[in-house]
Amino acid sequence: MHIRHLSIQNFRGLLKLELRLRRDSTVLLGENQWGRTSLSRALEAVLGPDDRVLCDRDRTVGATAPIQIGLDIGESIPGEFDCCAPLSSLPCTIFGHRVVRLLLTHAEGNTVPSILDGIGRPVELPPAQAHAAHLELRRQLPVIRLSLWDAQDELPGSSLTDTTWMAAMKAWMSPDRDGPPSRRALLQSAEAATQELSDRRLRDAASLDLASELRALPGAWRHSEHRPANADRICAMLIAAHALLKADRRGASEGVRPILLVEDPETHLHPTLLSNLWSLVEQFPAQRLVTTNSPDFLGAIDLRAIRRLVRRPDRTVAHGVKSKDLSESDVRRLSYHIRTLRGGAFFARAWILVEGETEFWSLPGAASLLGHDLDAEGVRVVEFAQAGLESVLRLAGSLAMPVHALVDGDAAGRGYAEILQRHDAISPCRLTVLPANSIERYFWDRGLDGAILESAYGADAGSSRTPGRAIDDAIRRHTKPGLARRLLDAMSVDPERLVPKELGDVVASAIGLARQSVRG
């Protein structure tokens, strides 16, 4: 079974939220205080351990209506509900798929479960039957919160501290002045820690493939001196095993597919170790809900798994890429050129879309000369030429990302302008067309011809060269990023006069879009 859809009303900071979840991993992006943690706590209140329940103090400040949390649960395998007596007779079909729609309502100290039909109306059931269905869903979809770096906690229900696990972590994370641990010492400490963990609580994770992998590890490590061993993977396995066995307080029984809540997995972890760790977590037979602030982490995530939370005055909206929004070809191009190379763009409040390298390097520098910090304002410059403008616009539209596009005045730029004008955007989409065939020629016409000539031919350069020839020679000598830096140096002498007006207007517009997106 898996969660298809989650709805929340009046829970902590969330006045209202609707969220589609994928069967495997869903990754939440959002600013601080925008509801990522509240969303995880809501899931725990519905499906988590017995001590995680709804209470009056969970109601959003100022709200008078009851707390309501709804889940649409679907079958991962046809006929799955028939194996669970409390669920088998519940009537609900959505687009040909059997779904159990659970709604928890909390008011005046009481939490009442109910079952909804396909259009959201309560089904007439005895209270005991709705309660039994809720208990069965808690058993079939246990929520497990993974804290991937928490060496000080003890395993719940255990009187023993994780002595060998902590020893293994200390061996791995030893201070530089002590030198790195020897390969043999690391393997021995890892073997001992894994044995301790598996002996103590392995039976509680009987349905997880991790169990067999843990059992096999000690024997494999004994012989690892005869072949290369990946120490990062060993460390990742230890962290994942410890976190899973520590968090699974109820013990997931055979056949159960839990929901793993993973908050900010990048905390304290080098990107290489994080990559190894996530590759292991992805193998767990579970539905995963992840929050992150790491562009590096997004490099390993399917573009369609990302959900961008945007807070509005009356609700929080989760924006994500739907299958119909982008083709497989679009996803491949965007995954490389935007997610992998420019992952930080997903955490922005607004984008400036540009054609090439000169604009990419010039705009942040020009903004700085004018007294603005684009990063601090939440504005990112994104190149669209390699990924394709239409694909980037569809991605921005899916994520409700405001954009201001800057294009050249040549034939290609006019084509881009037509695409932008046709774009049906749910967020602001503004356009500036430069009054020149290229941004380099635009700089030339705006009083930076001397800097370009000097970049091309040195301090003694004359003014007899044509603009096109001088620009080509300057780029050939310094590359486009190099020329952009030299032009910024020239502008810094007198920014108010030498930073071209159109660039200043684009920067101001993008900052305005970013600030507006925060205000909602």
Image (cartoon, grey):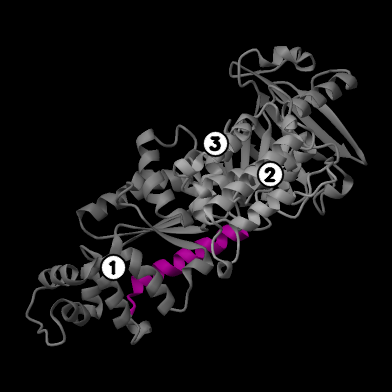
In the displayed structure image, the side of residue 298 where residue 386 appears, left or right = left
- Label 1 vs label 3, nearer the camera: 3
- Label 3 vs label 2, nearer the camera: 3
Which residues are the magenta region?
Answer: 499-520
* Amino acid type of the residue tagged 3 in the rendering: Ala
Q: In what element is the residue under mark 2? A: helix
Residue 513 is one of the magenta-drawn residues = yes
* Amino acid type of the residue tagged 2 in the rendering: His
In the displayed structure image, the side of residue 116 where residue 32 appears, left or right = left
Q: Cβ–Cβ below 8 Å for labels 1 and 2?
A: no
Place of residue 134 in the rendered image (x, y in percent of width and height, measured from the top left)? 80, 26
Place of residue 237 in the rendered image (x, y in percent of width and height, measured from the top left)? 59, 43
Residue topped by disc 3: 220
Dividing the picture into quarters, in which one does residue 103 lie? top right
Give the mark, 1 or 3, whose residue is nearer the N terminus. Answer: 3
In the displayed structure image, the side of residue 124 where residue 500 appears, left or right = left
Q: In what element is the residue under mark 3? A: helix
Dividing the picture into quarters, in which one does residue 333 lie? top left
| Residue 308 in view of the camera | no
Measure how far apart labels 1 and 3 are at the Cα level.
50 Å
Give the mark, 3 or 2, whose residue is nearer the N terminus. Answer: 3
Residue 374 is one of the magenta-drawn residues = no
- Label 1 vs label 2, nearer the camera: 2
| Mark identifier at residue 481 | 1
Seen at 62% across and 52% down, the residue is 264
Residue topped by disc 2: 242
